[in-house]
Image: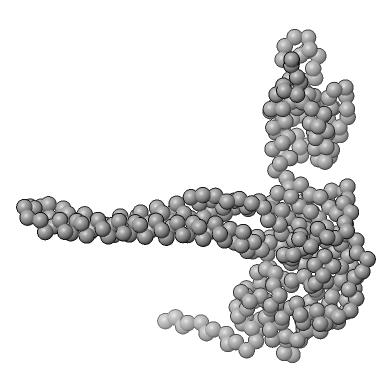
Amino acid sequence: MNSDRNNPHDSSPELVTFIQRFFDRHGAAVEANGPGLDILVPERLMDRLSVREFIRVQGGPIPTAGPKAQAQPQQTYSIAYGSEFLERVLRLACGEVPVVSCRLEFNYLKSQGFDALIRECVQFKGGLSRVEQWAKVVTHYLVLTCRYLAQSDEQKEGLFELGVHLETGAHVPAFSACLETAARCFSRGIPESNRLAGQVQKFFPGLRNAAANVIRQETAAFLESMNRKFRRDVLNLQEYYASLEKEMRQSLDRSGLSEQRVQDRLAKIALIPEELARKRDDLFKKYGIRISAVPCAALLVSTPAVKVLLSVAIGKKQKSLSAFYNPVTKTLDPLVCEGCQSSSTRFSFCGETHLLCQDCAGHCPICFKPKPGMSQPTPASTG
């Protein structure tokens, strides 16, 4: 008994629906025509799929000879499982990060106590902050689901999530976990991918630092395991060559060795440190860890929040800052370092009042000026 389901050259209604949604998303005009689809392909998609402007797709193999083949339009493609055209579409579809959007709803938003919250959540070294005003706003966050792969003598892979505020670029570590308890309504509208990618690109240095920190935590046990194996094998290697050198030197005391053999053996002993170093380098390459991370999916979150405007007094200077009360985490989002774009809760200021995290404090990456109270290094003279 034959079954169409078992036929690798057959297609399913799900495939037809997938193809239709794919071309709809990319701005094509799609019309159902009998068992297939007639598609008017946009110019930007024609080159990527290597097709003409008007094509027809259908399930099952395309006849190549006989009356049925002559009746087929010239640009007809099969979307059966394993077909070349379907593979092209899949590669293009999988090359894009799928994006879903949702809207959060809250019955209550914090409306007082922001001065105390600022003092509790953010430390300004050398600065005194006060709240100037606040307002309820609607803002957006992006939850990026990423896949990482750590490769060495073994490999480890997994998923992690990054929650980022699209207005400030702040990484909010607890956002995705707290999101599970929030009331949300998913939207049918799909955000414009190019605009979203541009916003993410603007905050890429900060996101890269946040991803590195998360991956470091996720792979800590794996890293320690590889380091332990490296130390073990290096120790065994050192013991082996130490034993070999001892044995070769003892052999020099034997009677009957010619002067030439003695010199040859001494030359081999002299090469042992070089060979040990080479073997150690081989072990280092073997247990060295290479890590890659790629985004897999994105969730765009629209939520009410409270925007708090701060004034920070730094000596005789004033600096205005914005902070956001996040109703999902029920606290303030971290602020963003103006030097490296990393998120933090502890900050200093340089002579030009740039907001700097602890890593950038003391030497501002923007103006290269030290923070107030520190002397500027004197350049060395040249003669």
Q: Is residue 13 above or below residue 380?
A: above
Q: Is residue 317 above or below residue 146?
A: below
Residue 360 is situated, as x and y percent measured from the top left of the image, at: 62, 75
- Furthest residue toward left: 256
Residue 11 is situated, as x and y percent measured from the top left of the image, at: 77, 26
Q: Residue at x 61, y 74 (%)?
A: 359
Q: Is residue 262 above or below residue 168?
A: above
| Picture quadrant where residue 304 is located | bottom right
Instruction: Decide if residue 303 is on the left or right side of residue 367.
Output: right
| Picture quadrant where residue 127 is located | bottom right
- Furthest residue toward front: 1
Q: Is residue 154 above or below residue 351?
A: above
Residue 190 is situated, as x and y percent measured from the top left of the image, at: 84, 48
Asked if residue 202 shows in the view, the reply is: no
Q: Residue at x 70, y 24 (%)?
A: 8
- Furthest residue toward top: 66
Q: Residue at x 58, y 87 (%)?
A: 375
Q: Tell me the quadrant of the picture where the N terminus can be found.
A: top right
